[in-house]
Image: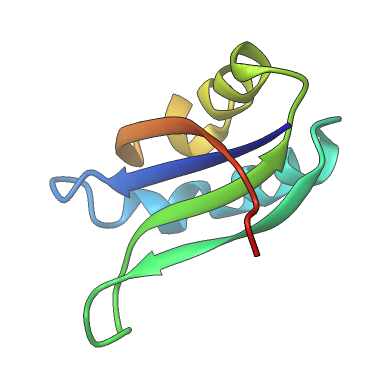
Amino acid sequence: MHFVIYCLDDPATPHARERHYAAHRAYLSSVPVPIVVAGPLTDAVGERRIGSMLLVDARDLEEARAFAANDPFHVNKVWKDVAVHPFIKAV
């Protein structure tokens, strides 16, 4: 089942993303949850990264939430807000 993981960075820690990027990438490469698509969210002009969006193929909501909770960006407080929602591909 597909899940969208929508994460917004904490504006109080603008350099945390850079500090934990390598650990975040290593985590994404090592987890058994298939990632359909993932990437950064940007500000309106596309210059500054403000969060992340991931579409994952998890067994259930709990697995998707655990996947997000164990990401180094979440563990190290890069993300201030994290939302996990089921996603139905319509087109």
Query: x, y (%) of residue 17?
Result: 41, 53
The quarter of the rendered structure image containing the N terminus is top right
Please state if 75 lies on the left or on the right of 39 as rendered.
left
What's the residue at 21%, 47% (across, down)?
A: 13
Query: x, y (%) of residue 81?
Result: 28, 34
Measured along the vertical axis of the image, is residue 83 above or below residue 62?
A: below
In this view, the residue in front, 58 or 44, is: 58
Dividing the picture into quadrants, the one containing residue 31 is: top right
Query: x, y (%) of residue 24?
Result: 61, 45
What's the residue at 65%, 52% (across, down)?
A: 89
What's the residue at 45%, 54% (across, down)?
A: 52
In this view, the residue in front, 51 or 57, is: 57
Dividing the picture into quadrants, the one containing residue 72 is: top right
Query: x, y (%) of residue 49?
Result: 35, 68
What colour scheme was applied to this rendering of the protein? rainbow
In this view, the residue in front, 3 or 63, is: 3
The quarter of the rendered structure image containing the C terminus is bottom right
Measured along the vertical axis of the image, is residue 37 above or below residue 13?
A: below
Residue lying farthest to the top in this orientation: 62
In this view, the residue in front, 37 or 75, is: 37
What's the residue at 24%, 87% (across, down)?
A: 45
- Number of marks drawn: 0
Instruction: Specify whether residue 21 is in view.
Output: yes
Residue lying farthest to the front in this orientation: 90
Instruction: Specify whether residue 76 is in view.
Output: no
